Image (cartoon, grey):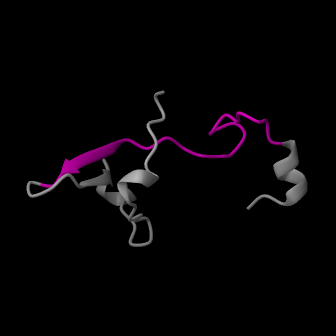
């Protein structure tokens, strides 16, 4: 986690890897056959962790390609 001082030093539009330490992960997208819900899973089964799930409402999603 970043301290307040470290957050103050992060650029306004940070690079996810260089500034925040994120690693890109290939995802497999599975759409529900019964409704418009999706499951996003890591492409590699070894990266699947029990604590790595997020449940979110549709209005919480943002298209990062915009």
Instruction: Tell which of 46 and 37 is nearer to you.
Output: 37
Displayed quadrant of residue 41: bottom left
| Residue located at (30% from left, 47% from top) | 43
In the orientation shown, which residue stands out farthest toward the bottom? 50
The correct choice, above or below, for 54 with respect to 28 in the image is: below
Q: Residue furthest left?
A: 33
* Depth check, front residue: 15 or 26: 15
x and y percentages locating residue 46 in the rendered image: 35, 59
Residue 1 lies within the magenta run: no
* 2 left or right of 59 in image: right
Residue 51 figure quarter: bottom left
Query: Which residue is situated farthest in the front direction here?
Result: 59
Residue 8 point in image, percent of width and height? 87, 47
How many circles with numbers are drawn on the protein?
0
- State the residue at coordinates (46%, 42%): 62
| Location of residue 51 with respect to 19 vertically, above or below | below
Question: In the current view of this chain or complex, which residue is farthest to the top?
Answer: 66
Does residue 26 appear to the left or right of 4 in the view shown?
Answer: left
Q: Residue 23, relative to residue 11: is it above or below?
A: below
Q: Position of residue 39 (x, y in %)?
A: 27, 55
Q: Position of residue 1 (x, y in %)?
A: 73, 62
Provide the major secondary structure of the magenta segment.
loop
* 16 in magenta: yes
Which residue does the image show at 36% across and 53% down from the upper left?
58
- Residue 8 is left or right of residue 39, and the answer is right
Residue at position x 31%, y 52% from top? 40
Q: What stretch of residues is rendered in magenta?
A: 10-32
In which quarter of the view is residue 9 placed? Answer: top right
């Amino acid at each position: 986690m970043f301290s307040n001082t470290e957050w103050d030093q992060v650029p306004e539009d940070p690079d996810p890897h260089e500034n925040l330490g994120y690693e890109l992960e290939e995802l497999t997208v599975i759409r529900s056959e019964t409704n418009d819900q999706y499951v996003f899973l890591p492409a590699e089964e070894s990266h699947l962790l029990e604590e790595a799930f997020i449940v979110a409402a549709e209005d919480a999603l943002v298209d990062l390609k915009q």
